[in-house]
Image (cartoon, helix red, strand yellow):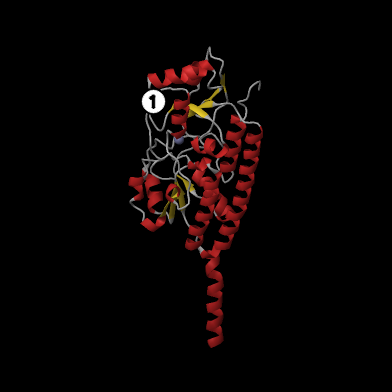
Amino acid sequence: MRIRSLASALCFCLAAPASAEVPRVVTDFSVTASLVGLVMGEVGAPIVLLDPGADPHDYQLRPSQASAIAAADLVVWMGPELTPWLPGALDSTGETHRMALLESPGTTLRRFGAAAEDAAQASSDAPAEGGHGDTDPHAWFDPDNGALWVGLIADRLADLDPEHASTYRANASLAQTRIAALDKSIGAEFSSRPPLPFAVGHDAFGYFADRYGLVVAGAITQGDAAAPGARHLAALRAGLQSGAIACLFPEAGADPKQAGLLVEGTPARLGAALDAEGRMTPAGPMLYETLLQQVADTIATCRSGS
Ligand SMILES: [Zn+2]
C-alpha cells in the first residue's frame, strides 16, 4: 500500500512537468516578438498585438487583443514612448506581469533631436521641429540593448516557468553571442568604409548612428510628429541640394513619393527603404538580426561613386 502510493506520487511528480503550460507571452510588435522568440525557441512563441505591416506608433487594439492581454502571463513591450495606445489596455494585467524593455535597468537610452541638433548647428539650419527632448523609443537599434533584453526576458520566463529555465537561458546566451558577432561585423564594415551623411524617412536611426559613428543629417518626419512642416522640408531639401546630405532613405511601408520629390533635381541619391520597425521584414525570431543587417547593408550603399 505504502509502496504503491509512493509510486503514484512519483508518477505524478514525473508527469506534472510534461503537462506544465508554457507561459502565454504577449508582445507589442515584431521586434519585441523576435527577441522573445529567440528566448523561447522551441518551447513556444509569443503573441504579437500589432498586425503585420502596421505602424507601432499609431494603432488601435481590437477587443480580442485586449482579452489576450488580460489572459497573458507576461506582456513584454517597448514602452509608452513607442506605443501610446497600449498602456490603458495593460491596466488589466498585474504589475508583475509586465515588462517594459525601455525601462529595464542597464538600457542605453537617447533623446530625440540630439543628432538633428548637431547637424543643424553644423549647417546653421533651423532646429528640429517636434519630438524635441523626448526619449527616442527606437532603442533596439543599439545591439547592446537587444543583447541585454534577451537576457532579462530569459530571467523573467525562467521565474514563470522553472521547468524550461535552462532552455530559456541557453537560448538567450546563444542569441547574445550572435548579436555581439553581428555588432562587431557591422562596426568593422562602417569603420573601414564610413558612409556619407544621409537622411531618413522616419527619425528612428539615432541609436544606430550613435553606435556606429554615422551621420544622420536629417529626417522627413522628426521625432514622432505626424506630418513634417514646410519649413523643415525646405531645410531638408536645401541639405540635399547643397551636397551636405548625400542620400535619402525612405521609410519601409511609407509612400516613397515624397522622398522622390525631395531628391529630384538634387545631387543626392534616393536609396532603398529602411525598415525601422520591422514592418516589412518576415516575422519570427530571426527578425531582429535580419533587421540590423538589412539596415546596415542599406546605409552602407551611401558612398561616393557607389
Ligand atoms: Zn518609429
Give the answer, above or below, for where 171 lies relative to 291.
below
Residue in the image at 52% along x and 83% along y: 5
Residue at disc 1, CB closer than 8 Å to ligand 1 = no
Res 125 quadrant in image: top left
Q: Quadrant of ligand 1?
A: top left
Is residue 22 in view from this perspective?
no
- The residue closer to the viewer here, 174 or 5, is 174
Query: Could you tell me residue 15's position as x and y percent?
Result: 55, 70
Give the answer, above or below, for where 226 lies relative to 102.
above
Query: Could you tell me residue 49's position as x and y percent?
Result: 44, 43
- The residue closer to the viewer here, 262 or 280, is 262
Query: Could you tell me residue 258's position as x and y percent?
Result: 47, 19
Left or right: residue 260 versus residue 188 is: left
Residue in the image at 54% along x and 82% along y: 6
Res 168 quadrant in image: bottom right
Res 63 quadrant in image: top left
**Tag 1: residue type?**
Ala
Dot 1 alpha-carbon crowd within 10 angstroms: few under 14, some 14 to 19, many 20 or more: few
Is residue 93 in view from this perspective?
yes
What residue is disc 1 on? 227
Kind of element beneath mark 1: loop
Left or right: residue 192 versus residue 4 is: right
Q: Which residue sits furthest bottom?
A: 1
